[in-house]
Image (cartoon, rainbow, N blue to C red):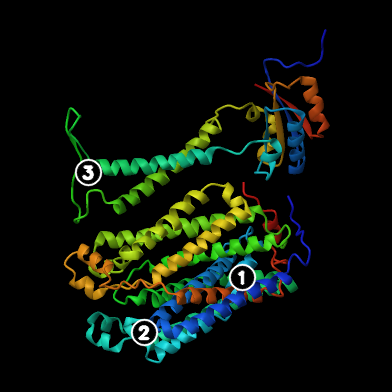
Amino acid sequence: MNTTLNATTEQLHLGAMGKKFTGVGVTLAVIGVGGTLALASSAGAETFWRAYLFAVSAAFAICLGGLFFTILQHIVRAGWSVTVRRTAEGLAANLKWMWILLVPMIVLVWGGNGHLLYEWADTDLVAHDYLLQKKAAYLNPTFWCIRMIAYGAIWAVLAKFFVGHSIAQDADGNVSRSSAMQMLAPIGIVLYALTQTFAAIDWIMSLQPTWFSTMFGVYYFAVSCTGCFATMIILLAVLKNGGKLGNAVNTEHFHDLGKMLFAFGVVFWAYIGFSQYMLIWYANIPVETGWFFPRQMGEYFYVSWILIIGHFMLPFVVLVSRWPKRFPGVIAAIATWMVLMFLVDVYWLVMPVVPTDALINSETNDALVAAVEAGEVSIGWNPHLIQLTAIAGVLGLVLAGWAFALRRCSLVPVRDPRLPEALAFENL
Amino acid sequence: MSTAPTPNDTLWGLAAVFDTPAKIMHAAKATRERGFRWFDCHTPFPVHGLDFAMGVSYTILPILVFFGGLTGTCLAIFLQTFTNSFELDIWALVPVVGYQFEVSGKPLISTPAFVPVAFELTVLLSALTTVFGMFVLNKLPCLYHPVLKSTQLKRITDDRFVLVIEAGDPEFVMEDATDFLRSLDPESIVELEA
């Protein structure tokens, strides 16, 4: 049983590899952001803002997952995860600047052009819609912008606190920092849960303002767990492949991260997604079922099935057994697939549009499906290059931000009091 | 004439008592390399890597659990489909018809409604397979065991680590086994009665 860290200083720092990460990230970001801006005028404002929301929701999901993982380890005083925690902290550290991504949306909604993205921000529509008037106490541009500022601030503060103390501990080895983080972690997780839930409601659920689901916040949480754990596995596998980390991260840690991906990213995701679907399907109330109509018609029908099979069934069968999780190459390949599915899932959440008028006017479901397939009714199926450039740009920023956050500090919390526990960790 | 102790009907095995996990790890490895197969280690807490040192192969329990769970899923789908919608009046002597109740206008075979039951039965049968599979694979319940009978080995539940070689092992010869165990530098060697 080895409880001493056996890695050189070079192995514990990004060094030259950091430049590669930053290089890839910045290149992606420049191409992505540049492409998005270049395509913006030809794509039209509505397409642009949907693509922007898609990219922002995905990027925040990954980084919020990193914050959740970091806080959770302090709450449960976990030993095994100490050596992989810094990778999650690097993702969480992005939240210190990611409020900038919310600024364009705040400017849009505050400036009175919110109707390009959100129906509830359309004053003419609200004037004729009783339900939207009743919801205006919550869904109005001013309050929405205030909430966005609050989320950005709370996430930045949480990330600064947990990442800052952890990195500072590398230098001074002060155990009281661990105690302080453990003391405040429960408050942190409550703040995280509330802000993440309401952010999901404000960003994505309010795209269809008359629709509501009490499970939506948890669903977005499951989405963010998928994104975060899959990203962590890929980053660690790349670091390990580049000769970094020494004995700090080994098969056992990949095995456990694989379990987290399996539990949260596959099973929990399916559990929440299905629970949400089944309650709505069973009750069969028009105001609730509307959200699922565009998702089981036209092209989105196939996207939904891709998610059921590719995001749940296949990964379930592959990840349920022990051995795929114990080979970094295999688990990294599965994680790459899961990142892809995660992006499809966010796309599936953000893009479809409920054809409200057609839903009211159609005699039967078949007639509606026929109208959708004939192209007479739009359900928001609009694949556009701008969506690809937007997601590439934002993920490039996240990668570059991760490498920037870890540019000087150690890749492992080298003086965490529980480090020996993590090094000696074995799955029975 | 002969005075050397020989394996007899009452001897079940030889136990060597150690006082650290490191010693029993070494002892387990040496015992396996010496060619013994019928031996076991008793420790007050799980010692990581001891299974590997003893050469114990990985359990087949997960495979049993997978098929237990699969049985649960299939059983649940069959149960619900059958009771909701089945009609068997072609070849059966007595016509068998399911409870064909329409509930809130849903089809008789409504997959979403079947999923929670399928999920629960999968979990139930997986859990039962895990528990009872463990019992069977460990040959439990075991109401009598020679190691538990010995009053000299009581500290295996507290702070001693015991390696037991069974007399039934094909390699077991009393003198050799005693010498071998003594070479491992144990605290004491105990003869166990069957």
Report whether residue A119 is seen: yes
Task: Identify which amino acid the numbered label 2 is placed on.
Answer: Leu
Proximity of marks 2 and 1: CB atoms separated by less than 8 Å = no
Q: Which residue is mark 3?
A: B85
When asked about the image quadrant of residue B177, the answer is top right
Front position in the image: A425 or B67: B67
Instruction: Select label 3 or label 2 by which is in front.
Output: 2
Q: CA distance from mark 2 to mark 1?
A: 35 Å
Task: Identify which amino acid the numbered label 1 is placed on.
Answer: Glu
Tag on residue A116? 2
Q: Which residue is mark 1?
A: A89
Label 2: chain letter: A
Which residue is found at the position 73% from the left and 22% from the top? B171
Front position in the image: A147 or B23: A147
Label 1: chain letter: A
Q: Earlier in the sequence, mark 2 or mark 1?
A: 1
Which residue is found at the position 51% from the left and 55% from the top? A262
Report whether residue A257 is seen: no
